[in-house]
Each structure stands twice: as C-alpha cells, then as structure tokens.
Image (spheres, helix red, strand yellow):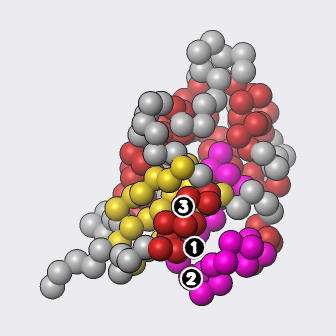
Amino acid sequence: MAKKKKVLFIEGTSNKSNGDLSQGFYELLKQELEGHMPKIAMTNGKMQAVKQFKNSKVAFSFLLIDLDAPEDFKEEKIIELGLQKKEEWIFFMVQEVEAWFISQPNILDDYYRIDISSKLKGKHPKKIKKPSELLMKLTKHIPRKQYHKVKHAIDLLQLLDAQQL
C-alpha cells in the first residue's frame, strides 16, 4: 500500500542563512513520528504558513503556528485566520516556540552552560507573553550566545523531550 503524502507547514523562516530551522523540528517530531514523518515546509511567517496550508493539495496537510496569545484564545485565532473547517489539522505553539524551551529549563541550563532554570522558577511558560524576549534577556550577558530565534532554536528543538511537550 502506498504511503499517503503528508506535509506540515510551520511558521518560521525558510531562509537558511542562520541555519535550517526545519532540521530542528524534524529531530523533535521524529521522537514521536518516526516512520510517519510529514514533509516539513518552513514558511516565512504566520500568514504565509496559513495561506500555504489553506491552498495545499496534499492529502494530509497540517499547520503549526504561534498562538501569540493565551491558550484560551485558540478558537478566536482559528476564526480570525479563517480556518474553522480545518481546525483538527492545526496545532499551536503557546505563545511561541520559546515557551517549549522554557517548559524544559534543564535544556537551557545545559545548552547555555549557566543556571537559567532558577530564574524561571514560578514562571509558567503559558503565562509568559513573549517567551522569546525573556530568553534574549536571560542570555544577553553570555558572549556570542544571546538567544537567537533561528540559530539557537535549531539546537534547542532537538534537545526537547517530545513526550513532555
């Protein structure tokens, strides 16, 4: 039996000048989807991801985008983006992918070789409005290692435990 095509459109960047973000997502998703991996299509921002997802002719298309809002705004965001008929195929990163890193602070400690987790005590990742800004602030004093949304995300995605997410 032939495998059905699957594609996952991800908000981010297709520009590889700072590294291939799709590689980080591939390694993370492989933990749970080995043998059933979709093709990963990095897009240049949320609206391009939504447009490509809506226009996809692939049998199984999925969408992974930032919610940029608290979790209880999912339905509102689905309506705002005109995705009501496809909502079962949509997955949100609450708020941003950086919230995933903050949810597993031990990977931040290991990656940056400083104690970041103690600075995150009491901060629930879903409650942080701009996790990316918090990571930049927490790493700004590390020479040549201040958090970068692409360069560091590639490495950090691969370190995450998919089951914990």
Q: Quadrant of residue 36?
A: bottom left
Instruction: Give, as a three-letter code, the residue at label 1.
Output: Ile
| Whole-number angstrom distance, CA of label 2 to CA of label 1 | 7 Å
Could you tell me which residue is drawn at 17 percent across and 81 percent down? 2
Position of 67 compared to 60: left or right?
Answer: right
Instruction: Give, as a three-letter code, the residue at label 2.
Output: Lys
Position of 56 compared to 35: left or right?
Answer: right
Quadrant of the drawing holding the N terminus? bottom left
Residue behind mark 3: 49
| Whole-number angstrom distance, CA of label 3 to CA of label 1 | 11 Å
* Mark 1 nearby-residue class (10 Å; few <14, some 14–19, many ≥20): some
In the image, is residue 112 part of the stretch drawn in magenta? no
Residue behind mark 1: 90
95 relative to 138, above or below: below
Could you tell me which residue is drawn at 68 percent across and 72 percent down? 81
Position of 84 compared to 25: left or right?
Answer: right
* Mark 3 nearby-residue class (10 Å; few <14, some 14–19, many ≥20): many
CB under 8 Å between discs 3 and 1: no
Work out whether residue 159 can be spotted. Answer: no
The part of the chain drawn in magenta is 76-98
Sequence-first tag of 3 and 2: 3
At which x and y percent is residue 112?
Answer: 59, 25
CB under 8 Å between discs 2 and 1: yes
Could you tell me which residue is drawn at 43 percent across and 73 percent down? 56
At which x and y percent is residue 96?
Answer: 68, 52
At which x and y percent is residue 60?
Answer: 39, 78
Residue behind mark 2: 86
Q: Quadrant of residue 88?
A: bottom right
- SS state under label 3: helix
